[in-house]
Amino acid sequence: MPHGPDRTENGAAGASPAPYDFEAEVLALLPSLRRYSRSLTRSDTDGEDLLQDCVEKVLTRRGQWRGLNLRGWVLTIMTNLYRNGRRQQGGRSFVDIDDNSHLAAAETDNDPLQRSRLETALNSLGEDYRTVLMLIVVEGYSYQDVADMLDIPIGTVMSRLSRARQKMTSLLAADNVVTLRRPR
């Protein structure tokens, strides 16, 4: 349904309008955005705050979206909001992720400590490494997409991902407990 002449957010004619179902598309991204915000902040509470700030900024700047890769555009906004917040905070330290036992998740492994080990390993990664790991491994972005979102060279993305995987592997291997059995 047309809403009059094409206008940008500030009212200038000529720019293409945001799609009619823009809000629905943003709403569909919320689970992915929530995961990413929590991985950045290492906290459910701070992650929710970052998510809300991001959604607010996305909705108020919808006229700036050019119709290509909404998910990438929104994740770039979230990453920049997080970085700007970190700069404003200065040297504050982080606390561990809040207890997420209230979230439903299917247990697929017999090791009850595996989730705790994984959480600890992820939290031990530096911000740059954790961001690249989450965007590529969890969110499924390509190296080039991540390079564009974070405004870094693709080689840096590949290097950070490799180092993040190596550190995760060594941290998780160091925590494994091997039971000793008597040979038969």
Image (tube, rainbow, N blue to C red):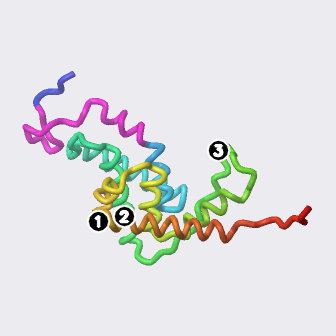
Residue 69 relative to residue 160: left or right: left
Q: Quadrant of the C terminus?
A: bottom right
In the rendered image, which quarter is residue 157 located in?
A: bottom left
User: Which residue carries the number 2 mark?
Assistant: 157
The residue positioned farthest toward the bottom in the image shown: 91
Q: Quadrant of the N terminus?
A: top left
Neighbour tally class for label 2: few under 14, some 14-19, many 20 plus, Cα within 10 Å: many
Residue at image position (25%, 33%) is: 19
How many angstroms separate mark 2 from mark 3 (CA)?
30 Å
Are dots 2 and 1 in contact, CB under 8 Å? yes
Residue at image position (29%, 43%) is: 69
Magenta stretch holds residue 28 = yes
Q: Which kind of residue does numbered mark 1 sit on?
A: Pro
User: Which residue carries the number 3 mark?
Assistant: 105
Asked if residue 140 is positioned above or below residue 150 in the image, the reply reads above
Neighbour tally class for label 1: few under 14, some 14-19, many 20 plus, Cα within 10 Å: few
Residue closer to the observer: 141 or 6: 141
- What kind of element bears circle 2? helix
How many angstroms separate mark 1 from mark 3 (CA)?
36 Å
- What kind of element bears circle 3? loop
Asked if residue 4 is positioned above or below residue 167 in the image, the reply reads above
Q: Which residues are magenta?
A: 6-29
Asked if residue 18 is positioned above or below residue 160 in the image, the reply reads above
Neighbour tally class for label 3: few under 14, some 14-19, many 20 plus, Cα within 10 Å: few
Residue closer to the observer: 28 or 86: 28
Q: Which kind of residue does numbered mark 3 sit on?
A: Ala
The residue positioned farthest toward the left in the image shown: 13
User: Which residue carries the number 1 mark?
Assistant: 153
Q: Which mark is residue 50?
A: none
Mark 2 and mark 3 lie on one chain; the one further toward the N terminus is 3
Q: Which kind of residue does numbered mark 2 sit on?
A: Val
Does residue 77 show up? Answer: no
